[in-house]
Image: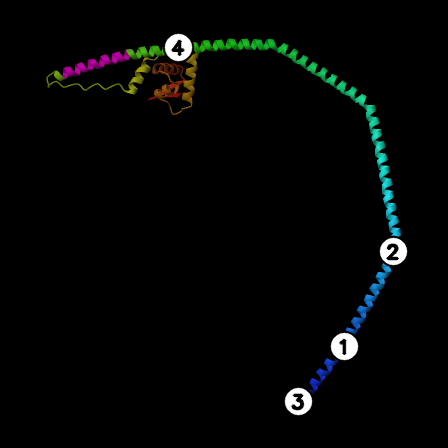
Amino acid sequence: MGWGDETRNLTLDIAASHEVRKEAVEQLREDTRDTLAQFDAELKQMSTKLKADLSHIKPDLTKADAERVRQHQTDLRQRQSELKDMFAQINTTLAKVKPEMSQAEAERVRQTQAELKDIFTQVKDTLAKIKPGLAQYEAERVEQTKVDLKQRHAEVKYRIDQVSRLLSENKDEREKSAAAWQELAGVIQAKKEAPAAVAEPAPAKAPTEEWAEEETMAEAKPVEMTPETAALSDRVFDYLADHPDGTRMTELESEFVTARIQMANILKGLMDDNKVEKREKHYFAI
């Protein structure tokens, strides 16, 4: 069999298969139309039956609904009656207990008033007991204040006397220094007017701070220990103890705002008591 014959046979088979499929599709369409028509008839029949059944049970449903409404109304009236009875019982109970509550409230008020009266009496008695002690304490405080004022007055007076004495001493020192400088100036002038062969003496040097401090310490003497000077001495000793590297007299004067002669007297007393020592230009607590 040639290639042309095979092609012709294949074409004939395809055409025959197409006809078969076409007939099968037509049959399927017919079956589908029959099935849909049957479903439509069954739906119409079911709808008719449901409507008939509904028309038969509708009176029963309406009756049941009316019965349910009547039952609810009956229950509501019963609940209202029960609430009314409950309110009546509550009012009756309140009417019975109201006098008791009023009496209890009045008793509570009387009890509170009695307790407040007792507290007021206790406070009054306590104040009466402590009043003499308070008066005594106030009197002692006033006396102590007077003593403190007298002590402060004595301290101020002492400082005023010390300042006056220092001013007087400084005045004398200034006068002595002025006289010494005038004398020295006269000597220098005389040397200038003398023959040139005579050698002039070297000019005197002005007193240094160390020299003035040494002179002040040489003139210092232990002071009489009053409460003020004792307190100042203790403060100076504590300050020196807090400065182990030593302290100059000028620093102590500036720290305690005290005249040099008074500070020298304080240091002299501490050194005599072996509490302070001087090494070179500094003072140290022992």
Disc 1 and disc 4: Cα gap in Å?
A: 145 Å
Name the residue type under label 3: Gly
Residue 85, horizontal then vertical, whole percent: 85, 32
Name the residue type under label 1: Ala
Cβ–Cβ below 8 Å for labels 2 and 3? no
Residue 89 appears left or right of 131 = right
Which residue is pictured at 32% across the width and 15% down the height?
A: 216
* Sequence-wise first label, 3 or 4: 3
Disc 3 and disc 4: Cα gap in Å?
A: 156 Å
Disc 3 and disc 1: Cα gap in Å?
A: 31 Å
Residue 251, horizontal then vertical, whole percent: 36, 21
| Residue 269 location, quadrant | top left
Disc 2 target residue: 55
Give the number of the mark in front: 1 or 4: 1
Q: Secondary structure at mark 1?
A: helix
Disc 1 target residue: 24
Disc 2 and disc 1: Cα gap in Å?
A: 47 Å
Vertical comparison of 128 with 32: above or below: above
Give the number of the mark in front: 3 or 1: 1
Name the residue type under label 4: Tyr
Which residue is pictured at 84% across the width and 29% down the height?
A: 88
Q: Secondary structure at mark 3?
A: helix
Give the number of the mark in front: 4 or 2: 2
Q: Where's the N terminus, which quadrant?
A: bottom right
| Residue 209 location, quadrant | top left
In the image, the segment drawn in magenta is 172-191
Cβ–Cβ below 8 Å for labels 4 and 2? no
Disc 4 target residue: 158
| Residue 94 location, quadrant | top right
Q: Secondary structure at mark 2?
A: helix
